[in-house]
Image (spheres, rainbow, N blue to C red):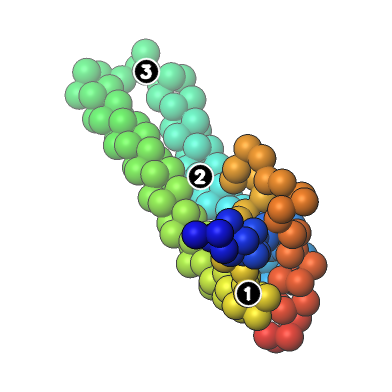
Amino acid sequence: MLFAPIATFAQKFGHVDTQAIMQSLPELSKVNGELEALSKQYQNELEGMQREIQTKMDAYQKQQSTMNETQKKETEAELNKLYEKFQQAQQDNGNAFQKAQQEKIQPIQEKVFKAIENVGKAGGYVYIMQTGSLPYISSTLSKDLTTEVKAELNKMK
């Protein structure tokens, strides 16, 4: 019973700044570049659709007074269909971007988590917490292992 408190104090706790670790990886810069290009591609596609809708809307407004009711309804239906297609493309592109983002970043996150695990096992740590995920982490009772994790990542290359 007397030794129980001593065992509690012998436990080692660490913390890491995973965001700083991720930002230091060249892989993340490459992925961010790829995601930025993909985002630009989607943005250009949507802007092209918007221009098409606007051009057809302008033409409709200019010719509206000379159109019969059937032509007006057909043109309005076409404009509505283009707008619905635009909205669907917005949603599809957003979903595709999120999926691409997850697929590209997940392997990097897994690599970082593996490095954290390796540092934890090698150092005999009970817990390694993420800086920023808790309101307070004691700097006297918990060691910042960010540098060690970065070093471990360099070994893993």
Residue occupied by mark 3: 64
Image vertical order of residue 52 relative to residue 93, above or below: above
Residue 76: x and y, percent?
Answer: 30, 26
Q: Which numbered dot is residue 124?
A: 1
Left or right: 75 as drawn, with respect to 96: left
Which amino acid type corresponds to the residue marked 3 in the rendered image?
A: Gln
Q: Is label 3 in a helix, a strand or a loop?
A: helix
Residue 10: x and y, percent?
Answer: 65, 65
Left or right: 24 as drawn, with respect to 3: right
Left or right: 21 as drawn, with respect to 38: right
Which residue, as the protein is rendered here, is positioned at the far top? 65
What quarter of the picture does the C terminus occupy?
Answer: bottom right
Q: Nearer the viewer, residue 61 or 148?
A: 148
Residue 121: x and y, percent?
Answer: 60, 77
Residue name at image x 57 percent, y 63 percent: 3
For residue 19, which quarter of the picture?
A: bottom right
Q: Nearer the viewer, residue 91 or 76?
A: 91
Image vertical order of residue 89 relative to residue 148, above or below: above
Image vertical order of residue 14 relative to residue 25, above or below: above
Mark 3 or mark 1: which is in front? 1
